[in-house]
Amino acid sequence: MSDAITFRRMTEADLDAVLKIEYAAFSHPWTRGIFLDALKSYEVWLMFEGAQQVGHGVIQVIIDEAHLLNITVKPESQGRGLGYRLLDHLMKRAFELDARECFLELRDSNRPAYRLYEQYGFNEIGRRRDYYPSADGREDAVVMACTLLE
């Protein structure tokens, strides 16, 4: 990583660029409508490497709990620690908003994300059977939680 990593809040004007990354990264991506709704109610952040947008993330904070709803790094930028940087930014932002614990769900098959969350301090606390659509029908969600520290 030679260029500086920066973050800024997403606006509606960023939607096409965000969707391009989202659709490249996931078999079941968020839609334009979901992102528009997220912009109204949640914290939606973009991550840049230099001038290039390389990721985005969405958190919801309710009282002292945060929920990580989406975290995405451009496929060609994965494997270089950018996901950790984005996750750290989102968790620090959640803490600033008075969250003291964060929850998330991820596909059981998404082992790279599982390892990232585990490395950050998340622990598996449960499973939701047949939660996600998949190419073979349905897939379990792994539920994880992490205490947020300053």
Image: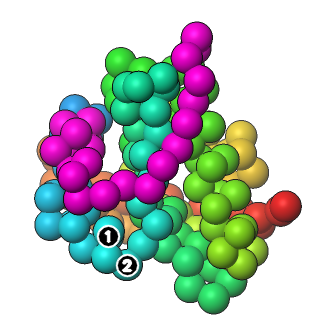
Which amino acid does the dot numbered 2 rest on?
Ser
Could you tell me how far apart the alpha carbons at marks 2 and 1 are, in whole angstroms?
5 Å
Which amino acid does the dot numbered 1 rest on?
Ala
Q: Are marks 2 and 1 in contact (CB under 8 Å)?
A: yes
In which quarter of the view is residue 100 placed?
bottom right
- Left or right: 64 in relation to 138: right
Identify the secondary structure beneath mark 2.
helix
> Which residue occupies 15% across, 66% down?
33
| Residue 31 position (above or below residue 128) | above
- Left or right: 33 in relation to 70: left
Magenta stretch encompasses residue 2: yes
Q: To which residue does mark 2 refer?
A: 41
> Which residue occupies 58% across, 68% down?
103
Identify the secondary structure beneath mark 1.
helix
Q: Which residues are magenta?
A: 1-22
Q: Position of residue 97 (x, y in %)?
A: 66, 75
> Which residue occupies 55% across, 17% down?
3
Q: To which residue does mark 1 refer?
A: 38
> Which residue occupies 63% across, 88% down?
63
Magenta stretch encompasses residue 79: no
- Left or right: 73 in relation to 89: left
